[in-house]
Amino acid sequence: MPLTDTAARTAKPREKLYRVSDTLGLSLEITPNGSKLWRFRYRFAGKPKMISLGAYPSITLARARELRDAARSQVASGVDPSHHKQAQKRALEAATYTFEMLADEWHAYSAPRWAEATVQKARAYLDKDIIPAIGKRPVTEISRPDLVDLVRRVEGRGAMNVAGKVRQWLNQIFRFGLARGVVETNPATDLDVVAAHTPPARHHPHIPLAEIPELLDLLSSASCDVSTKIAIRLLLLTGARPGELRQAPWSEFDLDAAVWTVPAARMKARRPHIIPLPTQAVELLRAQHAITGRYVLAFAGKANTSRPLSENTVNKALSTIGYAGRQTGHGFRHLLSTELNSRGYNRDWIERQLAHSDKDEIRDTYNHAQYLEQRRGMMQAWADEVVQLCSKLDSSKNT
């Protein structure tokens, strides 16, 4: 007997799930909690199958029969209604799954594998350049020309380094989307082929050692914050990366033992790094401790002490005293490498001091030696030489 609307409406729940049949495979399923669901039973490729057609009373008896008849037509045409329904669901999800959702998933997945500086930088590129341009669009609708236009806008303001990073992040995001199964192609491949041509740039310029005393002299009388002056001098004396120093908590420093231990989570190479501190660096850190010792971060920001100095603070200070385009915070690492290599120090000592990975991956995997005492002597000699050069400048000024 065909099911009536009255029978559907008055069907009561029982201790166990049961179904009330209509016709041609349609039935109403009543669960113990009282919900009522339309089910359609059919056979496809010789196998019995069943799909849901929605909940009663949102789906009326008449509408359920229409959906049943549509499903029967699909079976007659050689289409499995279950597969068809899943395809429709995926299409609906794809239409509402935006690039921003994919980018956020990628960032959250990648963050634990990155140094903190990379986490913050990737987030900044997403929020400033990528998501405002394409974030709200369904990820499956984004094409290669869309991405070329996005990168062109970044190049148009002269930010070539940023454009390169944006191309890199886009490629990684869409590769992640391929692995997740939310996109079928990667429109971000080969974007470098149409990248705007730029002349070779000195990404981390640095002045010769002979000019360092004058830089430090100008720095000492500059109007910038004392913590910034100390940070610049420490970068020169240790060869640390600016991000490693800016984000360092006081807990990483043992000033009595004159060592700074950076955990693997904060290192670019994802391995711990021990930095021997020359006596001059220890003195600078003790002076800094008098300023920020009550905070977690050694170089805590002035406006918000839970956050480090801004990424641009050091370079801005160097620019203010006349070294724009000539010296950056990262450039001190290049200066240190050049000078130490020219003095004939062991290459492994220098590379370990700079926390560089060995280009020979097998050698790098097994070479865990820190050369701590050798590096301590090397860096103390370097710091003493810088002091000696500065003393010569002071003597010439007094004569």
Image (spheres, rainbow, N blue to C red):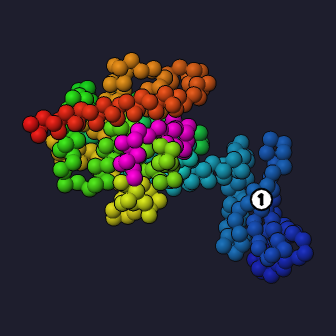
Answer with the quarter of the image where residue 289 lies.
bottom left
Residue drawn at x 69%, y 47% as measured from the top left:
83
Q: Answer with the quarter of the image where residue 293 lies.
A: bottom left
* Magenta-colored stretch includes residue 279: yes
Q: Nearer the viewer, residue 107 or 317?
A: 317
Q: Which residue is mark 1?
A: 40
Q: Quarter of the image holding residue 203?
A: top left
Instruction: Tell me if 342 is positioned left or right of 325 in this view.
Output: right
Q: Nearer the viewer, residue 383 or 36?
A: 383
Q: Is residue 201 above or below residue 60?
A: above
Q: Quadrant of the N terminus?
A: bottom right
Point out residue 390 in the picture as x, y percentages from the top left corner. 23, 36
Q: Is residue 46 above or below residue 55?
A: above
In the visual, does 366 lie left or right of 194?
right
* Circle 1 crowding by C-alpha within 10 Å: few under 14, some 14–19, many from 20: many
Residue 56 image position (x, y, % from top left) = 72, 72
Residue 280 visible in the snapshot: yes
Q: Nearer the viewer, residue 283 or 75?
A: 283
Residue lying at the far front in this picture: please name it. Answer: 399
Q: Dividing the image into 4 quarters, which one contains the C terminus? A: top left
* Magenta segment: 259-286
Q: Is residue 132 visible?
A: no
Residue extending farthest right: 15
- Callout 1 amino acid: Phe
| Image point (58%, 25%), residue name | 367
- What residue is at 72 percent from the left and 46 percent from the top? 80
Is residue 202 depicted above or below 52 in this figure?
above
Q: Secondary structure at mark 1?
A: strand
Percent across and percent down for residue 178 are: 56, 39
